[in-house]
Each structure stands twice: as structure tokens, then as C-alpha cells.
Amino acid sequence: MFGRYFKDYLSILISLTPTKLLKMKKIEAIVRLSCFDKVRDALAVIGVNFFTLQDVKGFGLQKGKTMTYRGSVYDADYIPRLQIDLLVENERVEEIVAVILDSARTGEIGDGKIIILPVDQVLRIRTGELDAEAI
């Protein structure tokens, strides 16, 4: 059974022209915990309602310091952050990055990072839809 789906997938890949490839990007935004609600709400305003979220810890310029978040003191050797992963069409990258920058920036060390990566293809497992239709 898997072999049939694999053959279908291969035929789809082979039929794609180079102009159809690399039409998408993955945006990884690592932000402060305290900024997440603001980022999420700002993304929703521009119609971005799907992303993946994970707790991450980082090590950077704040090393050796302690910080307070919601009344709790944290050792800042490994700083808790949230990573937001979005798959978007190339045309929306600048808009989404601008929204994340505006909503996550405090102007202090530790505001986070935004990484933009090329995406060859996105495939929805359930339906076999490709790229923008798969999101």
C-alpha cells in the first residue's frame, strides 16, 4: 500500500518544473515567553492562524545573569524561550517577519532571533496536497 503512495508522490515530484520549487519558506522565530501572546495576536490580525510552537532554551549574551519572569527568578545560563515555526509562501515572508519584529522587540538583549529557511516542498499527509494548499 505504501508503495503506491510513494509512486504517486514521485510522479508529482518529477512533474514539477523548477519554477514551482522553492516557492515557500520556513520562518523560525525564537521569542521571549513574555512576548508570545503579543506575537500570536499580531500574526492572527494578518491572517496567520497556523504555526508550530515549542519550548526551547538558549545560551547567549545574557549568560551569568538572573532574570525575573512573572515573579519567578530564573538562572539565565540557559534562558527559556519559545520557538514559533511557520511555513509560508515567499510573498508573505517580509510581512510576517515585520509583524514578528514589531511585536517581539523590547530593545533589550535577549529579544530572540528570526531564521528564514528555503522549503523545497510541503506535502499534507492526509490528502496529498502540495505547498500552499497543504498549509
Image: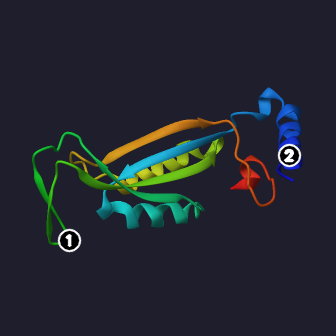
Which percent across, then down, holds residue 2? 82, 50
Res. 101 in view? no
Position of 23 with respect to 113 (left or right) is: right
Q: Which residue is mark 2?
A: 3
- Per the model, the C-alpha gap separating discs 2 and 1 is 52 Å
Question: What numbered label is drawn on residue 103?
Answer: none
Amino acid on which disc 1 is placed: Arg
Compared to residue 62, the image places residue 44 above or below, namely below
- Picture coordinates of residue 97 (x, y %)? 48, 46
Along the line of sight, the residue nearer the viewer: 43 or 21: 21
117, above or below 125, in the image: above
Instruction: Residue lying at the far top in this picture: please name it.
Output: 18
Q: Disc 1 marks which residue?
A: 70
- Left or right of residue 119: residue 97: left
Q: Please name whichever residue, 105 or 68, is drawn nearer the observer in this view of the structure.
A: 68
The quadrant of the image that shows the C terminus is: bottom right
